[in-house]
Image (cartoon, rainbow, N blue to C red):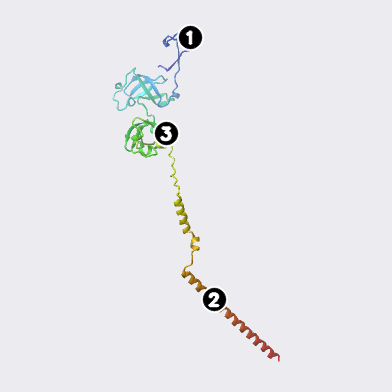
Amino acid sequence: MSFPTLTVVTLFEAVETGAMEANEIATRVIQQPIPLEGIKRKMKFSGVVKRINLAGAIVDIGLPVPGVVHISQLQQGETKRVEDVVQVGQEVEVWVRRVDPKKKRLELTMIKPLDLEWREITKGMVVKGKVTRLEKFGIFVDIGAERPGLVHISEMTHGYIKSPSELVKEGDEVEAQVLEVNRRKKQIKLSMKALEAPPQPTPPPSKAMTPEKAKEKAEKKEEESPQSHAESEPTVMEIALREALERSNLKVVGTVGVRKKKKRALDEQFEQLFERTLQNRRK
């Protein structure tokens, strides 16, 4: 089994030999195996096919444990025979699919993994991608997921545009924010304007008041003020009503005076009669 190697050439060795070419320099080879604990999913390796069988291929990528490529992971689509895709001794590019350091098991794939899997896509995350298709209602952007994301025309910019082609074209690199992700329907909704600052509202133009309008407004206000109504002259009906009230007040006052005089006279007569009665009893 081979291991990844690290070739070290010291400056002293180069000076000692006086070599000008790399193949003339004495080299020291140090073997440094990579532990399985340092291997992560989606890591890319170059390897050599060591053995094939009905279930797949065994690939040496320079680790203590060889990797296993299942027949379903040799290529996109259906594979009937392993030898139709790879041969023993062939150099291949593989990616880590699963790794179990305890069981010392390493599963590889020759199918390039997605940059973003469904469980990795979350609402609010910012993604970058390439415009793959333009439609009247928006654009489709490849963000490295199983399906491209859709940017609706209303989410492309804060302003109004008639067609997406006014902003982008196929092949453009764009940045967007995830608005919604539906794993069941395999739909990803994106927004480009969510990453843009909203436009500031412009204040309405001030309308300067002309002297004529100011004078007209002042006159109208003066006409509507309650003081102007208070200073207006009384009408004929108001004068007649005031005179009638004054006459009725005089009559009331006169009647009250007569009643008081009569009451005073009766009181005087009663006192005189009471005095005479007392005098007769004394006699």
Q: Position of residue 134 (x, y in %)?
A: 32, 34
Q: Are marks 2 and 3 in contact (CB under 8 Å)?
A: no
Rendering quarter of residue 260: bottom right
Residue displayed at 42% across by 33% down: 126
Q: Of 204 and 177, which appears nearest the observer?
A: 204
**Of the residues shown, which amino acid type is indicated by label 1?**
Val
Rendering quarter of residue 169: top left
Image height check: is 233 above or below 198? below
Residue displayed at 50% across by 60% down: 227
Q: CA distance from mark 1 to mark 2?
A: 141 Å
Dot 1 surroundings within 10 Å: few (below 14), some, or many (20 or more)?
few
Q: Of 22 and 255, which appears nearest the observer?
A: 255
**Of the residues shown, which amino acid type is indicated by label 3?**
Val
257 on left or right of 233: right
Image height check: is 250 above or below 209? below
* Residue hosting label 2: 250
Q: CA distance from mark 2 to mark 3?
A: 96 Å
First in residue order: circle 1 vs circle 3: 1
Q: Which mark is residue 115?
A: none
First in residue order: circle 1 vs circle 2: 1
Q: Which mark is residue 15?
A: 1
Image height check: is 23 above or below 141? above
First in residue order: circle 2 vs circle 3: 3
Q: Position of residue 110 (x, y in %)?
A: 35, 24
Outermost top residue = 17
* Residue hosting label 3: 126
Determine if residue 181 is in view.
no
Q: Of 43 and 236, which appears nearest the observer?
A: 236
Outermost front residue = 212
Q: Are marks 1 and 2 in contact (CB under 8 Å)?
A: no
